[in-house]
Structures are given as structure tokens and as C-alpha cells.
Image (cartoon, helix red, strand yellow):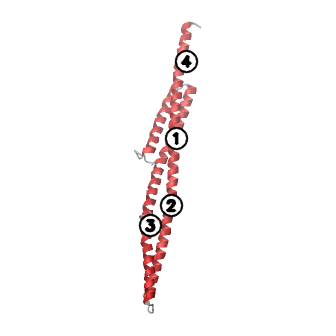
Amino acid sequence: MEANEAGELMDGEKSDDKFKTRAAILIAVLAMMLAITGLGGANAQKEATNSNIFASNLYAFYQAKNIRQTNFALAADALEIQANAPGITPEAKVEMQKKIDAYRKNVARYESEPETNEGKKELLVRAKAFEEARDHALRQDPYFDYAEVLLQIAIVLVSVAIVSGLSWLVLGGALLGAIGTLLMVNGFLLLVAIPGLG
């Protein structure tokens, strides 16, 4: 082997090493994007589940308040009818009216109770806020799912490119990685609604 042949062989190996180094760096970047995407997707799923549970709990609390409110209203109505019946003494009528007033006060308190934030009106507002948070998280989730798939495929393509030396696989992996990264960013920010995804 002559010196110039050895030099050409070494230059070829250096070029091959640069290719492998760049591909390995691309894999590291794609893996980092994949980790961030996985975190975003997991958080979106947790947020959707938790918000749905909180909304369901608040609607159940609303229904319980509604049942109690109806019971107090019915009791007040029945007592009012009784109080106006013939033969009721004025003293009994006064006592009945006190009870009717207490029942009506409870009916009003169950309708709206801003100091505790647990009246029916306030419960509905809180439940709707959790529904909105759930819906937002559910809109985010598909973007993270597709981003994960594209980033994983990109990592595989670039890994195969290192073994095979095919540079077009790196370009394909980089393109899929870029699309996956854009989907991940859109999952966090919901800048664009892509039909069929969100």
C-alpha cells in the first residue's frame, strides 16, 4: 500500500466518522424531543382525567344540592298549606311561618352561596371550568401521540443510516423529526388545529 492510498483511506474514514457523529448528535436531539413529547402527552392525559373527575364530582354535588333544595321547597310548600288550614291557632301559625322562612332561606342558600363557593350557581361555574380544562387537554393529546410516533420513527431511520451509511435515511429521519417537533410544539400551544388530530 502506498502513502497516498493510505491517506485516501484515512480521509474516507474521517468523512465516515463525521457522518456518524452528526447522525449520533441528531439521534440525541430527537431522543430529547421524544422525552419532552412523552412528558407533555402524559401531562395532557393526567390533566384530562383529573379535570373530568373534578367536573363529575362537582356535578354530583350540584345534583345533591338540587335534591336538598327541592326537598326544602316541598316542605315549605306543604307547611304553608298546613298553616292556612282552618283551625290552626295563631301561635302555631307563627311557629309554622318561622319554619317556612327557614326552609325558604335554605332554598335560596342552595341556589347561590358565594361565601363558600358551594351554591348550585357556583358549582356549575366550577364544573364548567374543569370541563374546559379537560377539553383543552384532550385537544392537546393527539398532537403529542403523533409527535411521539414520528420522533421514534426518525430515531430508527437515523440509527439505520449510521449502520448502512445511507445519507438519505438521515434526511428522512431529520424531516420526520422536524414534523414531530412541530406537532409537539403545537401540542403544548395549540397554535393550529389540524383536521383529524385536534
Give the mark toward the camera: 1 or 2. Answer: 2
Residue type at tag 3: Lys
Q: What label sits on residue 13 in the rendered view? A: 4
Q: Which residue is mark 3?
A: 120
The reply to whether discs 3 and 4 touch (Cβ–Cβ < 8 Å) is no
Q: Is residue 80 visible?
A: no
Along the viewing direction, whichever of 138 and 91 lies nearer the viewer: 91
Along the viewing direction, whichever of 142 and 66 lies nearer the viewer: 66
Q: What label sits on residue 56 in the rendered view? A: 2
Q: How many marks?
A: 4
Residue type at tag 1: Glu
Residue lying at 42% horizontally and 74% vertically, measured from the top left = 105
Q: Which residue is mark 1?
A: 148
Gap between marks 1 and 4 measured at Cα:
34 Å
Residue 94 occupies quadrant: bottom left
Q: Is residue 128 visible?
A: yes
